[in-house]
Image (cartoon, rainbow, N blue to C red):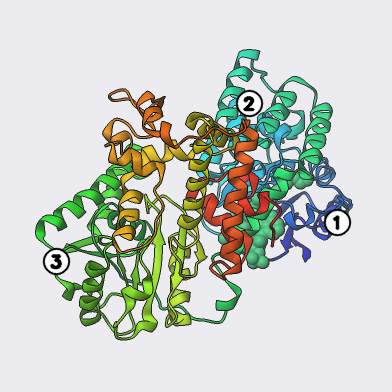
Amino acid sequence: MTVTIDRQGEIATVTVDNPPVNALSAALRQGLWDAVATLDADASVAAVVLVCAGRTFIAGADVTEFGKPPVPPHLPDLVDRIEAAAKPWVAAIHGSALGGGLEVAMGCRFRVAVPDAWLGLPEVGLGIVPGAGGTVRTPRLLGVPAAVDLVTSGRPLRAAQAAEAGLVDAVVQGDLLEGAVAFARLALTRPLPQPVSTRPIAAPDADFWAEQEKAVAKSARGAAAPLRALACLRKAAEADFADAMAFERQTFLDLRGSEQAAALRHVFFAERAAPRPAALRDVEPLPLRRAAVIGGGTMGAGIAAALRDAGLPVVLVERDDEAVARGMANLRGIFDGAVRRGKLTGAQAEDRLAGVTGTTDYAALADTDLVIEAVFEEIGVKRAVFDRLAEACRPDAVLATNTSYLDPRAIAKGLPGPERFIGLHFFSPANVMKLLEIVPVPQTSDRTLATGFALARALKKIPVRAGICEGFIGNRILKRYRTAAEALVRQGVAIAEIDAAMRGHGFAMGPFEAQDLGGLDIAYLQREGARAAGQAVPETLGDLLVRAGRKGQKTGGGWYDYAPGERRPQPSAIVADLLAGSVDPGPAMDRKAIAAHLVAEMAAEGQAILDQGIAQTPAEIDLVEIHGYGFPRWRGGPMFATGIRG
Ligand code: 3H9
């Protein structure tokens, strides 16, 4: 770590260099503290530009220090000291000014940023609140409503949005340091603005806060930090600066040691480790310039959209012209939806679509680096596709199957050059869901495996390596979860109670509501297939429902009834009748006990998965559950939540 002082005439520059992300370690805080003293004492300095070396401005407090006792100088004191410096400081921002980094910048008299910089307070995502004046200075700079949005969502703003909101004084085109020094010189010719801490706040009324509380509680789904951050903002609006700072600091320290914060730190580090497994550090992936998808159904179109979002040209292969047209229409539907939600402009959507070539001709794959097969889940159909890929593709092209349940070894059987074969299990909708299970077969080369991880990085997905077993990691745990939930129904626990228990635990939906939404028939057909193949698959309650024509919302009923055109589940007398013969009432269970039991079942399956080497670490299982199955992030995943860590 270094803090270097240079001079350009009367403007001093302070350069922070603390790789990889200039996090505010104790040594850096001390370095900046000393720099204020040095520059205050230097009569030749009129203003100071604070700039960072490397890929980013200060990206926040050093998260690795959070488990340890705080060491002085404390960050709030450092921010106060910069704000009270005898010379005005200008924060020159590139990359990300996040958390403590933005708090330091708000202690400066001015902030300038390059156009692609991000500014934000992501602390709630780590289970804490900003702890160095973020909740107290932001409303003074932006006004309360914009501050509430920034702090309670944790979502960062781009430089231009930040400038519009009042968080940034100027967006610098061209060289940042030059621009910031010029800005400082000009600023010295005008009256200085007040330090942020002394600016007034327009306090909203009680109704505003009641409304915000309702909205924040709804989206937080049990996470504590967003509501605590809102309370800090209210204090900032209603009390004086010092009292609000003391309230924020106390809240920060309370939360820092909480179980939720520990869980979210666990997820933070697991997510950063996942895309770059240590075992592949020295393996060069195949460069990905052109990709192809076989099959334009829901899954194939979603994968093609994800590839286009990452900027790769895509060839979409289908078996006849009609299917090509359907696949292209599916893709158009995805991009149009993104336009409707404001995620893409019309022109961007057109560009995305223009980068997809729909064809029935495998010859179009001659120079493709990666092909992802996403056709019907039937071994014969998949094998036929790989026979054609073997003929059409370059011998070094990576050939991937997107299977959920089939054994990838059976799909790869007989493929010339099986070292280039790999399973890539996407989750629907594939352009949205973050999880990617990467499933090598025994012959898969390290290079192919590394290419799978490189693809995940390009698609901004969370990759987890999975061994081969039925359902890999995620669907195997899902099966256990559903079986355990059905077992509770057999013991007389109401279906709606189980769903409510899991929602109360932080899931968006309970296991039965989720099945009604996705359809009960997919798992049913799979069980029937296994039975037809001679496997002993026990009869499930879901089987009884599907046989009675209840496949979920799409048939007007599954585990629940649905009024026409409505999605609100209503407990069903028909289901009660259908299942009556299978229920043998046991002891009553409250919602907490139900959730604890079902999470313990997930963790037990996770442990079996670890024991069999299907997953490498408990943290990876947690990532699968959080990113593929809606497990509440703030609980850290089923393994972390039940004390299985590592
Ligand atoms: C805070 O500031 C609290 C204050 O309000 C109050 C204090 C009193 N600390 O993500 P990457 C490591 S809370 C320590 O792959 P990118 C990361 O683990 C903090 N380490 O890079 C990885 O290590 P390794 C608020 C950190 O270029 C390496 O840096 N701030 C921290 O894709 C590269 O990370 C945040 O929450 C950290 N704060 O993205 C910002 N951040 O190489 C969190 C990263 O050993 N960080 N590391 O695996 C980010 O969002 C991204 O890292 C960033 C760069 C966008 C900056």
Q: Is residue 404 left or right of residue 380?
A: right
Spatial distance from mark 3 to mark 1, Cα to Cα?
A: 64 Å
Q: Where is residue 242? Give x, y as percent.
A: 84, 29
As measured in the structure, the alpha-carbon distance from the residue carrying label 2 to the one carrying label 1 is: 32 Å
- Side of 554 relative to 126 (left or right): left
Report x, y in % for residue 436.
45, 60
- Kind of residue at disc 3: Thr
Identify the secondary structure beneath mark 3.
Answer: loop
- Name the element at disc 2: helix
The answer to whether mark 2 and mark 1 are in CB contact below 8 A is: no
Instruction: Indicate the position of residue 135 as horizontal and vertical percent values.
Output: 70, 34
> Which residue does the numbered mark 1 point to in the structure image?
30
For marks 2 and 1, the one nearer the N-term is 1
Which of disc 2 and disc 3 is earlier in sequence? 2
Image quadrant where residue 121 sits: top right
> Mark 3 or 2, which is nearer the eye?
3
Position of residue 341 relative to residue 436, above or below, is above
For the residue pair 382 and 245, the one nearer the viewer reads as 382
* Quarter holding ligand 1: bottom right
Residue topped by disc 3: 360
Q: Disc 3 and disc 2: Cα gap in Å?
A: 56 Å
Q: Which residue is identified by label 2?
A: 144
Q: Residue at x 29, y 82 (%)?
A: 415
**Residue type marked 2:** Val
Q: Quadrant of the N terminus?
A: bottom right
Query: 10 Å neighbourhood of mark 2: few (<14), some, or many (≥20)?
Result: many
Residue 559 showing in the rendered view? yes
